[in-house]
Amino acid sequence: MFSTKASLVNKETIWSGFLLLFFASLFFPFGQAIRYFFLGAFVLSSIFIIKEKKYKPDLLKLSNPFLYIFFFLAYLVISFLLSDQLDGARALRIRLPLFLFPLVFLFIRINRDRRDGLLLKFAIITTIFCFTCLNYAIFQAIKKDDNAWLYNDALSYFINQQSIYTSLLVNISIYVFAFFLIKKYHVIKHKFLLILTIAFLFIISYLLASRIMMFQLYFTFLCLFIYIIFKQKKWFLGLALLCGLLISVVTVYIFFPKTLNRFKELTITSYQYNNTAAESHYGGVLTKEQWNGANFRLAAWKCGWELFTHYPVTGVGLGDKATTLNQLYKEKEFHFAIETGKNVHNNYLDILYSTGVIGLLLFLLGWLFLPLIQFLKQKDILAIIITITFACAMITEVYFDRSLGVVLFGFFIPFLLSGTQTALPKNS
């Protein structure tokens, strides 16, 4: 009975349900256990879909991103085996989603319309949790008479998430909503509500104050306005949207000015490694003596680059990367980084100094460059923008050292790749 079409439809419905529960679990404030429970349920349901469809991927094709994804994963295992086993095992365990999701989506192909529909549901889930977070933050701000609850990590406190990850998900949701509004407007019944939702998420993005995500969001929409004005010749619509965005940003700034402190940090880039001053806070007074997000990253990036120059080909090893970095911190008397357990805050640099040029090249080919080439060939605009969003986000954070970061990246890129065909193959 499992070979019938009705059975496959039922399995796909269950699969979609577990996928949506997995989406929702990304925002649950109850810890990682429930997230991995739904992740496991999603993977198990995927196995039944794979058995039913019997899709056979061509891994021997040199342009197949999955080939280089698995090369990169194999290289991580080799790096682990050649370094400290205990620390390497911890690093490898955190990176397990990088292994799991490609294995699932390697054998699954999704109709692109259906994939986009699942992304729309993800965006709706994100909006609901953002609305909940905002209400909780407003309640805490009133209760404690402290407007700092409305900004940055405090805003995403209810879901126990760092603002950088929430900002990433908000950006993706905005792009999904905008995509449906512009490209699939015929399937949207409540367009005005969709516009209000996008405006709401823009406000949330501003309050979360992730600089890299805000820059990327505004630049993307600036390109969109240029496209509407010069390519589609819709001058009034493009200029109206641009003016609306500028008015929204100015209005939000007037009522929530503290976010500006996050950008003032970019003007203070000097540092001394032996500086023992505390880290600046967006709700406090910013001084040149403090560590801040800008000067710390410059200091940490220099350390990561120095380690790479010592081990350029294969890196220091996955299991030795934390120890080696801390040893360099000690040599430079970088006490602030040691006491706060800071990594290099750049995913590319982390891969570079831990696995060398070989590791970074395999990563870029499998996870970013070849997927982008495939999306460009398929004219999959939404997948292109989401992939670029991840690429930008990893400039200022080490996603692979955080369980949520590695789950998000490990899931989205293979998931997007599974929808690169507009129709399913006949044998699937």
Image: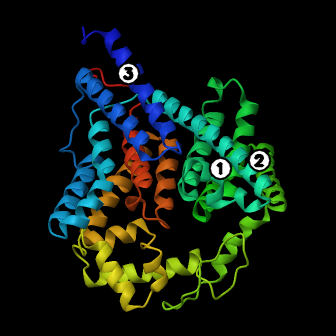
Above-or-below relation of 101 to 304: above
2 or 3: mark nearer the eye: 3
Disc 2 vs disc 1: Cβ atoms closer than 8 Å?
yes
3 or 1: mark nearer the eye: 3
The x, y position of residue 208, in whole percent, is 65, 57
Mark 2 or mark 3: name the one nearer the start of the chain: 3
The x, y position of residue 186, in whole percent, is 64, 24
Mark 2 or mark 1: name the one nearer the start of the chain: 1
Label 2 amino acid? Leu
Which image quarter holds the N terminus? top left
Mark 3 or mark 1: name the one nearer the start of the chain: 3
**Which residue is identified by label 2?**
241
Disc 3 vs disc 1: Cβ atoms closer than 8 Å?
no
Q: CA distance from mark 2 to mark 3?
A: 39 Å
**Residue located at (41% from left, 58% from top):** 402
Q: CA distance from mark 3 to mark 1?
A: 35 Å
Above-or-below relation of 3 to 85: above
**Which residue is identified by label 1?**
224
Disc 2 vs disc 3: Cβ atoms closer than 8 Å?
no
Q: CA distance from mark 2 to mark 1?
A: 10 Å
Above-or-below relation of 125 to 223: above
Q: Coloring scheme of the render?
A: rainbow
- The answer to whether residue 94 is visible is yes
Above-or-below relation of 224 to 44: below
The x, y position of residue 197, in whole percent, is 70, 39
312 vs 279, nearest the viewer: 279
**Which residue is identified by label 3?**
12
Q: Secondary structure at mark 3?
A: helix
